[in-house]
Image (tube, rainbow, N blue to C red):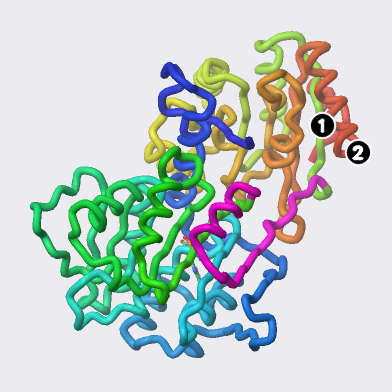
Amino acid sequence: ANATNIGAATPDATGDKSTEDDKDDRAAQSLLNKLIRSNLVKNTNQVEVLQKDPNSPLYSVRTFEELRLKPQLLQGVYSMGFNRPSKIQETALPMMLAEPPQNLIAQSQSGTGKTAAFVLAMLSHVDPSRKYPQCLCVSPTYELALQTGKVIEQMGQYYSEVKLVYAIRGNKLPRGTKLQEQIVIGTPGTMLDWCGKFKFFDPKKILVFVLDEADVMIDTQGHQDQSIRIQRMLPQSCQMLLFSATFEESVWNFAKRIVPDPNIIKLKREEETLDTIKQYYVLCNSREEKFKALCNIYGAITIAQAMIFCHTRKTAGWLAGELSREGHQVALLSGEMQVEQRAAVIERFREGKEKVLVTTNVCARGIDVEQVSVVINFDLPVDKDGNPDNETYLHRIGRTGRFGKRGLAINMVDSKMSMNILNKIQEHFNKKIERLDTDDLDEIE
Ligand code: ADP
């Protein structure tokens, strides 16, 4: 799996560590992305559409007006600062709002507008004059459910007759309760209890069922079964919608069980490339020498903002300390921090409050800080077995082709072993990594 350490909240916990961490990782990574994302991710790829009925015309919209939304919802959309539908929304929204409703499986990387799309679909389909649940939305974790709930509240801010309730652990309702809210959002276990065991609402009256973050969902033992059991209680006519950031075989198999006769929309992520990056390496003999080389680089060139990657938390902590002693404004991002804390650090760095961000692997994947012009691999990225991790390397320093500004990457090499890794990375990408003499830095810039 491509798991990073993002969510390893309890790295020392006993038990089946690898899978536990993986699961945590995905959910935490996803939450972190939501917390720091304020804009759509740019993507120049075409959406691929597979229609259930290939002969029916395919509609896509360029404006929100074309969707004939209720005025309260259009106002909500505009108040969120959306001017026009995102790439995936152009096709997904007409499908979701069609009459009769159509089922949809949609996959695109995080930040492309999936949540906003299904929230709009749910809000469009409810009848606020009926005081019972009509839309269900299941999310993999409590925190992710809360985030989606916030989007519903925001987009529905001018449509106050529509109410929302959270089916999440800790939200205990008295027996015999009959829910009046039109939208129920929650995690699969509590949701299943609420409709199956406690009968807080009638699943037969549900019009729209949304399963969000399917790839995170299937990582948790039990979530798959619970989701399928909820789905089985819903009427045939209920619209089923499933969303995922990635699409491995396992996600696909799950999706097909949840969503019968689906339309399918996919948007490939933007390719990353090293073409616009100048890559260098520096030869050193120790951690201290690497630090000295780093200081020389800082002395020689103007660096607006840099990200520095270390292999361990310990090195990252040490380096952050040394750098701030040198007078740099340093932020440290590390695995033991809570997701919210990490989001706050990244936010400050984005705002330019700190100029250097020192981090372990945790922020290598999924987070793009666009203004960063220099990336320093204080340690080269390696996998668990010590082999070069090309994918992480690319993700740390690569830029998405068309939008990428020119960048600079500097790799610190401190042993035969790391030289070997560097050579392998160079071979893999077939792109020269030039030697840099940090005592004579005229060549860069
Ligand atoms: P995903 O669910 O795919 O991760 P989101 O729906 O959360 O994506 O959207 C990512 C970000 O882009 C959010 O900050 C959201 O408010 C914003 N966004 C979504 N749709 C639009 C749009 N049509 N125009 C502008 N911003 C949008």
Q: Is residue 301 magenta?
A: no
Q: Which mark is residue 394?
A: none
Q: Residue 411: x, y in percent?
A: 75, 27
Which sits in the foreground, 260 or 394? 260
Residue found 47% across the figure and 58% down from its top: 38
Residue 120 visible, this angle: no
**Distance Cα–Cα, label 1 vs label 2:** 14 Å
Numbered disc total: 2
Q: Quadrant of residue 45?
A: bottom right
Give whichever of discs 1 and 2 has the lower sequence position.
Answer: 1
Q: Quadrant of the N terminus?
A: top right
Residue found 51% across the figure and 77% down from its top: 102
Q: Which residue is mark 2?
A: 430
Span highlighted in magenta in the image? 248-274
Tell me if the residue at label 1 has its CB under 8 Å from ligand 1.
no
Q: Residue 210: x, y in percent?
A: 42, 63
Q: Which residue is mark 1?
A: 280
Residue 167 visible, this angle: yes
Q: Residue 112: x, y in percent?
A: 56, 62
The reply, left or right, for residue 193 in relation to residue 249 is left
Give yes or no for contact between labels 1 and 2 (Cβ–Cβ under 8 Å).
Answer: no
Q: Residue 222: x, y in percent?
A: 41, 41
Q: Is residue 256 magenta?
A: yes
The reply, left or right, for residue 62 in relation to residue 284 is left
